[in-house]
Every structure is written in structure tokens, then in C-alpha cells.
Amino acid sequence: MKTTNRISNDRIKHRYFQYLKEADGRDEATIDAVSKSLAQFEAYTDRRDFKKFHIEQARGFKRHLAEQANARTGQPLSKSTVHATLGHLKRFFHWLADQPGYRSRIPHADVEYFSSSEKDARIATARRQPRSPTLEQIKHVVAKMSGRNDIERRDRALIAFTAVTGARDRAIASMRLKHVDLAEGCVHQDAREVRTKFAKTFDTFFFPIWPEGRQIVEEWVERLRSQLLFGNEGPLFPATRMELDENRRFVAAGLDKSPWSDAGPIRRIFRDAFEAAGLPYYNPHGVRNMLAMLGEKWCRTPEEFKAWSQNLGHEKVMTTFNCYGPVSHWRQSEILCDMRARAKTS
């Protein structure tokens, strides 16, 4: 019976994943998260057939999640993790309740029992100040990177490139030399070849925040072209070539002609560089947070901020405001101090 249940569940899950991808436009990362949530629920119910869904399964699973611990920290699962997991299940079962063979078995009202409490939902969805490095910290990290060989030059240029473009790590991993126009100071993020978020195509111009960082990027591109003889189709940040040493162990032996397959190596480079500089780790997305906050401070007109926002790949200015949190604590204090000073002189 369990085998039959497994086949039935797997078949309908496959249909749901197709729906998420092709009808709802969800990306692979979202679908993977949904798949993990469903796997947790199936493990809890001992892979019981979805057609036998009952209110008590939703109630029990919520209690089960509340008792689980984070595998890495050993602490209870965060409210946001629980809320996201329940949300994935709620949307799946609502969809399932409209499918032939399930419609008469799963009332929509029963699916609502996957909801978090109002209090937990507020905690889970509360907007918090995003973590981000300062521009001075980025400069310090890059200054500590020696650049003695091509691997170290690549790593240094990678962090500088992230800072002056704000490109996402998945996009950077897939970029090729042809996507960078040094004369125009522009990066062409073509969704046909670059793994951009939501498959959007747009141009990013180097942010005017750090001339030395831009110079590091330009020198790296020129080295790839003129000294390492990479062509237009060559990766902007090549993967590390591994070879066996005399002890039959794999060691780094220079740069490969292929790109990274995902953003994992980029995050490791950031982690190692920040730790080597004696600073807490900030992931690549934290640099986008930094750029959004710099834009709020440096842009003097709505048009300037619109251009800054578009440079981050945002179609709407409110995306930049909403996605990257409220005014930082220190900036809030600074603004109000300035306002008090103006009030005293008026």
C-alpha cells in the first residue's frame, strides 16, 4: 500500500511542480523549497496518500514543526521557517483540492489549518534591517587580498565587481567576457545567457562609488583577454582548475576555461576573504543591500534614485525601498539630528 501511495503522491507532486514552473512562473529555487516542505510533511504522515488528508494532519504537523530543531544551530526552527513551510503546504493543498480525484476529498476550509497563528505570522513576516557591509569594509577586504597569482586576482576582482555592479551571485557565475563593455562601463545582463532573477534582461552600469574597484575589474578583464587569451565566450570569472599533486591529492593549479556551475564558489570566496580580513562574513547579496542604502543617501532627485534602482535590476523604485528594508538605525539618527539642527536655526 505504501508503494501505491508513494507513486500516487509522486505523480501529483510532479504535476504541481510543472504548474509552478510553467503556469505560475516560479524558479527552480522556489520549487526546490516547496519540494522540501512536501517531503517533510510526507515523512510526518508516513507517506500517507494525499487523498486521505485530514484536518488533524495539519494540526499535528504544526505541532511537529514547533518541536523541531535547526540541524546546524540546534535551536528551534525560526518562525519564518515554520511560516514558509506551512505556506508551501497550504498553497499545494489548495491547488490539490481543485484537481480531479481530490476535489471531493479535500475541502478548502480544511486546508486553512496550515495557517500560522496571527502572532507567529507577524513575527515571521516582520521587516528587519538587512545585513550589509559598509563600502569601507569592502575596500578593506579587497586591500587585504594579495593578488599574487591568477586565482587570487580573480577572487579580488570578483568582490570588486560585485561592489561596483551589484550583480547577483548566480548571474555573476554565468557571465562571460562579452557581457562586459569596459568602454561604456556597462554589464549586459542578457537573460538568454545570464542567470538573472525572473529571467529579466537589463543593463547595469558601474556604480560611481569606488573608482579603484572599477579599475581592478578593468585590469582583470584586460588580463583575461590579452594575457590569458580568453575570447568573448570565455567566463568572466573562470572556475579553478584542479590537478593531482605528487601525493595524489587534488590541488588548485590555476584557472580553467569553464565557468562555475552555480554560485557556491562565489559565496565561499566572500566568506574566506572577510574572515582573512578579520571581519564578519557578509554574503554577496549583502553588497546589494549596501548599494540600496548608498542610493538612498547619495541620490538627490527622484530621477537619480530611479536610475540607481534600475541599475540594480528593479523595474519599480518601490522594489528597492521595500526589498531592502527601512532606513538603517544609524541613518535614522543622523537624519533626525540634522532636522533638529535645522529647526534650531529656522
Image (cartoon, rainbow, N blue to C red):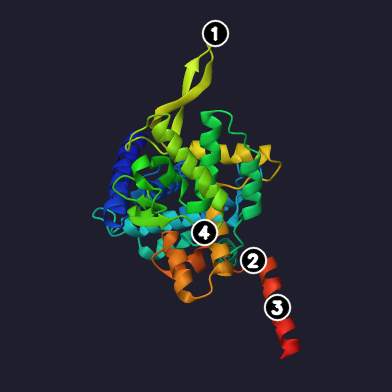
Q: CA distance from mark 1 to mark 2?
A: 53 Å
Mark 4 / mark 1, whichever is N-terminal: 4
**Residue at left 58%, top 41%?**
270
Q: Position of residue 33 (x, y in %)?
A: 44, 47
Is 206 situated above or below 343? above
Contact between marks 4 and 1 (CB within 8 A): the answer is no
Query: Which residue bears the numbered disc 1?
Result: 246
Mark 3 / mark 4, whichever is N-terminal: 4
Q: Nearer the viewer, mark 2 or mark 3?
A: 3
Direction top: furthest residue:
246
- Label 3 residue SS: helix
Q: Position of residue 90 (x, y in %)?
A: 42, 58
> Amino acid under label 2?
Ser
Query: Which residue bears the numbered disc 3?
Result: 338
> Amino acid under label 3?
Asp
Query: Which residue bears the numbered disc 4?
Result: 208
